[in-house]
Amino acid sequence: MIRLLHVYYPKRVLVLAVSEALLIVLVLIAAAVVNHGSDTELMLAYEQGYLKIGVAAVICQLCMYYYDVYEPSIINNSRETITRLIQVVGTLCLVQVLLYYIIPSIRLDQGTFILGILFLGIALSSWRTLFLVMNRIPRLGTRTVFLGTGPLAATLAREIGKRAELGMCLLGYIDSSPSPAAHVNGLTCLGGFGDLANVVQRERVEQIIVTMEDRRGKLPVEHLLQIKTRGVMVVDGADIYEAVLGRVPIHSLRLSWLLFSPGFCLSTPVLIYKRLLSFILSTLFLILALPLMAIIALAIRLDSPGPIIFRQKRMGQDGKAFALFKFRSMQWSGKVEESTPAQANDKRFTRVGRWIRRVRLDELPQLYNILRGDMYFVGPRPFVPKDEEVFLREIPFYAQRLTIRPGATGWAQVNYGYCSTIEDNITKLEYDLFYIKNVSVGLDVLTLFKTLKILVLGRGGR
């Protein structure tokens, strides 16, 4: 795994993305060569050919990102991958035509454009097919075993087993009390702690993931140190969980890991940056959005009786309550607060409310919350105090979520949908703790970029 913008990405996926970026450029240049022949150099050097091809390549890569062709659920599904690539090429055509109309100077000539689209479809489909074949070859993966069992081992076994792009070949697990009949998500027991060296040699193990629940006085430290000096990687299961899933393992979290792991340190420069960024962006967007907000306010007023702005008490940093502002999207019941979560087809929605919620315009008044310092642009989503008190009682480490100001969007929001159960909120807390642990400019930029993707595609709105 490689860490970029404080988020981990599989090496294979990064290699795939870079290779496809180069492939797109080379294919478009090849289309120019086929179309122009001996005049290709003139077209590329003196008719802004490189710029035109570069623009087309960037748009193609953005289309691939927005069609999720690098997501785990897509990257290992050959049929879905081909379908998405067809959609990418089709969208590229539409965007390019629109862009050529707006900026004629970046227009590729018709012959190069048509050949480029044809070549792109063939090249990308062929390259993805080759990648899928190579990605599924077990011999190319890192030979890995688990040390210990429990929920952490089960979760990692399930996730690694369905994600070939992680490049791990799971061989089995080693337990303190070995039982040949025992299994962990289909993985067999390879031996006990005393057999560790023999198992490593016999199975040609390259990586050991420590997934033991209780390690005090039980972890075979000396054996692991000897094996590590021979070139075998020994890694903490919690670190692998964080890298693979983009969240922190609540059920297997140890206080020592929470205390000594890098992160969870909100320094003064980071806090200044977050407040400054939130102030600048909220001011800018408020100015730009005022005409639209006035139209929405008028539509709400004409559509149904009740206030235009809906105020709801939410819990902020250090448990301090504040009033969250939203455009009213439901029938007015006369209550100041309404804590019942919205459903997908909630009958309480007004006609205008249903539309503004679908495109998230009901949250525009939160720009004022950000401006006055109740919230950051990026941070954990605030809940009503009643719900927060329940979560504080029932979910371990939940208080850590309140150490930072909440946000209008956040890492949990862009990676997980609405929460309806305690288990949902535990998963969302895992994402929030990952954000708090790794808070940075890069992670904020990535979260905002993912938020924009969600808004453009209209996903997740209720």
Image (cartoon, rainbow, N blue to C red):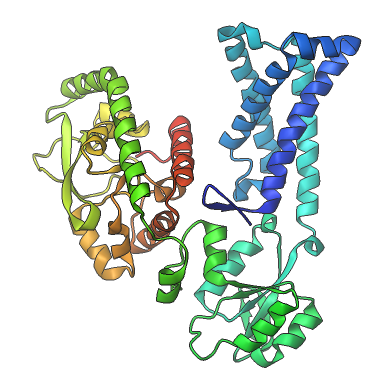
Residue 250: % across, % down: 42, 68
For the point 75% across and 42% down, which residue is it?
Answer: 128
Q: Is residue 323 visible?
A: yes
Q: Position of residue 382 (x, y in %)?
A: 27, 50
Quarter of the N terminus within the rendering: bottom right
Depth order, front residue of 442/291? 442
**Relative to residue 151, is residue 374 drawn left or right?**
left
Q: Quadrant of the C terminus?
A: top left
User: Relative to 412, does residue 273 appear above or below in the rendering?
Assistant: above
Between 15 and 123, which is closer to the camera in this rendering? 15
Q: In the rendered view, tell whether residue 142 sits above or below residue 38.
A: below
Q: Position of residue 449 (x, y in %)?
A: 48, 37
**Left or right of residue 199, residue 386 in this image:** left
* Residue drawn at (38%, 38%) of the image: 461
Judging depth in this view, the residue of 352 and 260 nearest the camera is 260
Q: Give percent across and percent down for residue 142.
A: 74, 65
**Which sits in the foreground, 280 or 16?**
280
Tell me what residue is drawn at x 73 percent, y 37 percent: 20
| 96 sits to left or right of 16 | left
Q: Quadrant of residue 53?
A: top right
Q: Residue at x 20, y 23 (%)?
A: 297
Observer able to see residue 77: no
